[in-house]
Image (cartoon, rainbow, N blue to C red):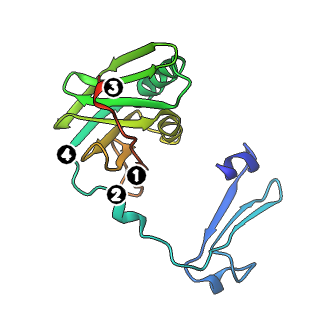
Amino acid sequence: KVLRHILPREGSVDIFYSTAPEDTEKENKAGCHVESLTEGIDFWFIPVDGKFPDYTKVIPKELDSVATVERNTLLKSLDRLHFFTPRDYSIISIKESGLHIKVSDKDFLTEAEECIPATLQGKPLTFGMNMKFLKETLRNIHSGNIQIAGQKPMNPFIVRPENQSETETVTMLVMPLHVDDEEQP
């Protein structure tokens, strides 16, 4: 996100990665260097020493529910529904009849729900999620169709392009929110 704002819209950009810090040309501590020759911009990513949790442990390996949906249709639906609630909270149900999205505002007694076409592989699943985070995720995937996949309502779920090239693997992890039984669509 930072690079998108500081790099020029036109011209070439070179990205250099190093697995060994001493291999970099310009600075011994850099793990990644981004350079825009036309604008004279250098951007360095410096690795931070320390112990970090293994994020791959929270990515679900076995997915019980996989919904394939058109990305722009889902994004437009979320934008429309976001108008009806001041919160970013929504409930998504993956069903055989499609992807059901529900939002509500208990203060003003408003509620909105949409069902968009989707194909389901596996069993139905309902989970809560932050609409803002999902919209941000969808805007950063450049694919016609995406898959939303999960295992259980309170486990993390993944969002990924439906068809990925062999040279690229995109998997976005989204954490769920608690869904009350009375709120389910």
Tell me the residue that label 4 is attached to. 64
| Rendering coords of residue 91 (x, y %) | 37, 30
Q: Nearer the viewer, mark 1 or mark 4?
A: 4
Amino acid type, mark 4: Asp
Residue 171, numbered circle: 1
**Position above or below: 114 against 61:** above
Closer to the chain start, of discs 3 and 4, is: 4
Closer to the chain start, of discs 2 and 4, is: 2
Closer to the chain start, of discs 3 and 2, is: 2
Closer to the chain start, of discs 2 and 1, is: 2
Disc 2 and disc 1 in contact, CB within 8 angstroms: yes
Q: Nearer the viewer, mark 3 or mark 1?
A: 3
170, 116: nearer the viewer: 116
Q: Residue visible at 40% across and 58% down?
A: 167
Q: Residue visible at 50% across and 18% down?
A: 80
Q: CA distance from mark 3 to mark 4?
A: 22 Å
Lateral position of residue 90 relative to residue 107, left or right: left
| Rendering coords of residue 96 (x, y %) | 19, 26
Residue 59, numbered circle: 2
Q: Nearer the viewer, mark 2 or mark 1?
A: 2
Amino acid type, mark 3: Glu
Q: Nearer the viewer, mark 3 or mark 4?
A: 3
Identify the element where label 1 is drawn: loop
